[in-house]
Image (tube, rainbow, N blue to C red):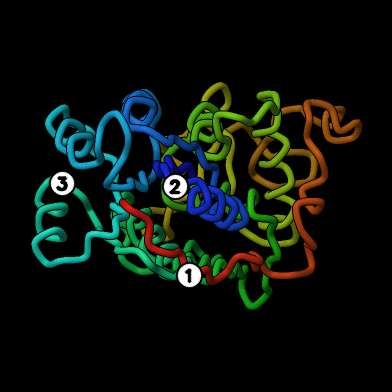
Amino acid sequence: MRILLIEDHVPILKALRQGLEEEGFAVDIATDGIDADHKARTTNYDVIILDRMLPNKDGDTLLKEWRSSGLTTHILMLTAKDSLEDKVHGLDLGADDYLTKPFEFEELMARVRALIRRRHQVKDPVIRIFDLSIDTSSRIVKRGTQTIHLTPREYSLLELLAFHQGKVVTRTMIWEHLYDEYDESTSNVVDVYIRYLRNKIDKGFSPPLILTRWGEGYMMRGSESDGGNLASVNLTEAAPDSTQYTDVSMAAAIGSGSGGVQNPNMEMNSNSPISPSLSSVNFPKSSS
């Protein structure tokens, strides 16, 4: 998932960015109101974390203008202003949540996860698709009784597909939500990571859950109650490995490591659950 982090206090900005990236988020940053305004209006973020006091244009002004113009992105406001009046004012301007400094990183993450679920109209923190379960709080993924160990990027891709279950997710959508503005990877990495994910989620299990719609993108198989939601999707016939999905030809890319794609297990030990080193940071009060 992709987040816009707006904070002018550099130590807090660096710590938050590090923690969010270790959790698998793609993070764009802005340190003043003008840059923040441009990025928020030109990119479809999953969540915006907005510091209230900013140079050039403050958070209150940005929030009011964004909501007036129809921006619907969920916004978490950060501020040292902790009075009841300040909290009410921020929420009434259009903030979806409000967190006062100092705070623990663990609490920030819980609020971000809740906003992402709200964006996709999901209440239960555990997403269940056939025998696949995705715990969005602990990031523990299981297929049946087997725990599936994923890298942060693989998990983010799986979560994105799961939130759009039964609907096609285009490569452009995946790219925009999984990669930040500084990433220099080439476009074929989406197909490569789909292949990595299928090897972990679908290989040896039935039915296959990650499907391809040729020329459009990928989708997570629909629920059992609607027959898997395949009737309206033009899928090709079974692939050589007897699964019911097909994949874009990418053997050369995977074999050679072209396109700037490294083995995803290099992101972290694939035999360990996702566990960022920055799990609890007490962020001090600044002037904002």
Q: What residue occupies the far right of the structure in this picture?
A: 256
Residue 80 is left or right of residue 11, and the answer is left
Q: Nearer the viewer, residue 270 or 217?
A: 270
* Precedes in sequence: disc 3 or disc 2: 2
* Quadrant in the picture for residue 69: top left
Q: Horizontal and vertical percent for residue 53?
A: 28, 44
Which residue is at a point 39% across and 41% down the rendered structure image?
6
Label 2 neighbour load within 10 Å: few <14, some 14-19, many 20+: some
Q: Horizontal and vertical percent for residue 8?
A: 41, 42
Q: SS of the residue at dot 2?
A: loop
Q: Which residue is mark 3?
A: 94
Q: Horizontal and vertical percent for residue 246?
A: 67, 36
Q: What residue occupies the far front of the structure in this picture?
A: 287
Q: SS of the residue at dot 3?
A: loop
Q: SS of the residue at dot 1?
A: strand
Q: Which residue is mark 1?
A: 282
Q: Which residue is mark 2?
A: 9
